[in-house]
Amino acid sequence: MSQTTSTQIQLAARPQGWPTHDDFRTATVEYGDLRPGEVRVQNAYISVDPYMRGRMNDVKSYTPPFALGETMTGGAIGRVIESAAEQLPVGTLVQHDLGWRDIAQADASAFRAVPELPGVPLSVRLGILGMTGMTGYVGLTAVAGMREGDTVFVSGAAGAVGTAAGQIARLLGAKRVIGSAGSAEKVALLTEKYGYDAAFNYKDAPVREQLAEIAPEGIDVFFDNVGGDHLEAALDVMNDGGRIALCGAIAGYNTTEKPAGPDNMANIITRALTLRGFTLGRYVQLAPEFQEKMAAWFAAGEIAYDETIVDGIDHAVDAFLDMMRGANTGKMLVRIADLES
Amino acid sequence: MSQTTSTQIQLAARPQGWPTHDDFRTATVEYGDLRPGEVRVQNAYISVDPYMRGRMNDVKSYTPPFALGETMTGGAIGRVIESAAEQLPVGTLVQHDLGWRDIAQADASAFRAVPELPGVPLSVRLGILGMTGMTGYVGLTAVAGMREGDTVFVSGAAGAVGTAAGQIARLLGAKRVIGSAGSAEKVALLTEKYGYDAAFNYKDAPVREQLAEIAPEGIDVFFDNVGGDHLEAALDVMNDGGRIALCGAIAGYNTTEKPAGPDNMANIITRALTLRGFTLGRYVQLAPEFQEKMAAWFAAGEIAYDETIVDGIDHAVDAFLDMMRGANTGKMLVRIADLES
């Protein structure tokens, strides 16, 4: 019989401002025997993402908050190691939302069988080929209505979603792609590896000044992962009819005071701008379209990506905190086990 | 020969904060003889509207700013009194943008012949049947994508656009229509005359508190004429997938300091909201659809309206300043001459 003991990360306290290790605890959960219809899964990788910070708060949102004292959830990929469900035999590769643990056990309906893709590392299935890449694609297309010839600005461009969004914008025919990031190294990566036409370090000078200088012809589409000063700066330079996809607002995730909004909201009217917040859950119907395009781009070598991988469920909180601080480049993942086929 | 002397209101200085009479001057313009293709028009009514305040500033916008020292422009209705253009003979009823003057003279292409509508006062052609009503219609439909069963909130609901928007929302099948206004008398008008289901006086208590109380089931569509505290309050209570049409931000038009934006912009993401600024110029293709629907509603007695009419071009600035202060109920107009057929 396979391992029935699961090491899981639970939310011990709702963080006030920046989360710390004290807000989490590691629990050992003993799963019982499988009930009919259940499977047990060994996770290979689990994902840590900025949106999880929001779920640590007890506020109304598109997804319910993490329950206090319970194991958190999140994107994961693994293999079935024991099965009481015909449709998911032992060895099946599955993606699912029971992350933040090494072993997951639940009804088979909680897992989705996914094809083996020889030559594609499993980690990538959670990154550029998974929700991360799809977030970039959906934000640009369905949310912002990007068109060929648009000038596109991506904030937090060296993050997992940002590196995807910039490359997708280029592949979709953007005239110019501009990105912001938080270090000189990341800025260099944007232009040298990720195909950005121009990039700046938002810590060097006020974003408002830097963006106005780097985008003298204005911006048509803004893919925002940061909010705050980035959104305000973009509202200054958006072209008439411009569209803003609000994907994240990491600038405000860990503040305890309510952040002041942009001082130039009136531009939304005078320039007929559209701001649209989104979360991927509303766009699941676009998954086949995304997977087809991204698989083709990936196979053609058009897509670069970075991963920052931390080993072991015991370091999952470290990975999450590092990611929130921007210590990663590209997708931040926790490796639980080597399950490459 | 008809009158060739035109009394016109010019922008003498760009207002700092609230405009005053000193920012305007009255000029007497002597028009020469008509050139081929030109017509001379006696205005019946000219319109004063909130958006004109924006054009008094020297900033990039969807319409160029008013030129300093020049006669301002704006919606007007009048009759041709002298013509050197076959297509617009003397007596033709015309709508046009050469307001802020009693007599207008220009190439015929600057004027649009409109049908006589017996029983419909000319003033209404600039109001509920004109751009004002169309702004309400377009904002709810094309901009906010209002659907039957939506709960709709309109700020500045007793203004010209607000009274139109509330009634149109009801006629389009809103489940509930909520409005805000700046006096007890206006609030009473909203529910008693304009078919609002609920209304509140935004001067009575913080908008945030009043709106949360009056809209316990949240809001699906917000038609915003005010901005500032109204937008912030709405972002608190918008339902998932809610849509906001940003039509005006009168709260900020006369401030000299940059206003802080809403402190709850993050709700745009977590609730997947859409904010869209608009100006009517982008939706001219909807004019026939609007006119057909509104004419039918109007003929069926479904549409109530108010007008605040000031007499004489010499009082146009008074009318504009009163309107900016909210002294009007419904459409604010300046009557230049009695030209009813």
Image: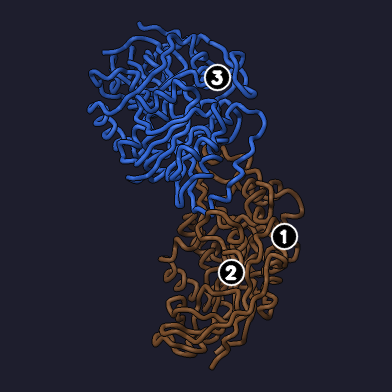
Chain colours: A brown, B blue
Q: Residues within 10 Å of mark 2 (few under 14, many from 20)?
A: some
Side of A218 where B138 appears, left or right: left
Q: Identify the chain of the residue marked 1, using the numbered disc in the image.
A: A
Secondary structure of residue under mark 2: loop
Q: Identify the chain of the residue marked 2, using the numbered disc in the image.
A: A
Question: What amino acid is found at the position of numbered circle 1 in the picture?
Answer: Gly
Q: Residues within 10 Å of mark 3 (few under 14, many from 20)?
A: some
Taking A49 as reference, is B96 above or below it?
Answer: above
Which residue is nearer to you in this view: B302 or A5?
Answer: A5
Q: Are marks 1 and 2 on the same chain?
A: yes
Which residue is nearer to you in this view: B235 or A269?
Answer: B235
Q: Identify the chain of the residue marked 3, using the numbered disc in the image.
A: B
Q: Residue furthest bottom?
A: A1
Q: Badge 3 is on which residue?
A: B70
Question: What amino acid is found at the position of numbered circle 3 in the picture?
Answer: Glu
Secondary structure of residue under mark 3: loop
Q: Position of residue A27 (x, y in %)?
A: 64, 76
Q: Badge 1 is on which residue?
A: A182
Secondary structure of residue under mark 1: loop
Give me the residue at 65% from left, 50% from top: A230
Residue B247 shows in this picture: yes
Nearer the camera: disc 1 or disc 2: 2
Which residue is nearer to you in this view: A303 or B242?
Answer: B242
Q: Badge 2 is on which residue?
A: A70
Question: What amino acid is found at the position of numbered circle 2 in the picture?
Answer: Glu
Write down the quadrant of residue A223 in the picture: bottom right
Label 1 vs 2, first from the N-terminus: 2
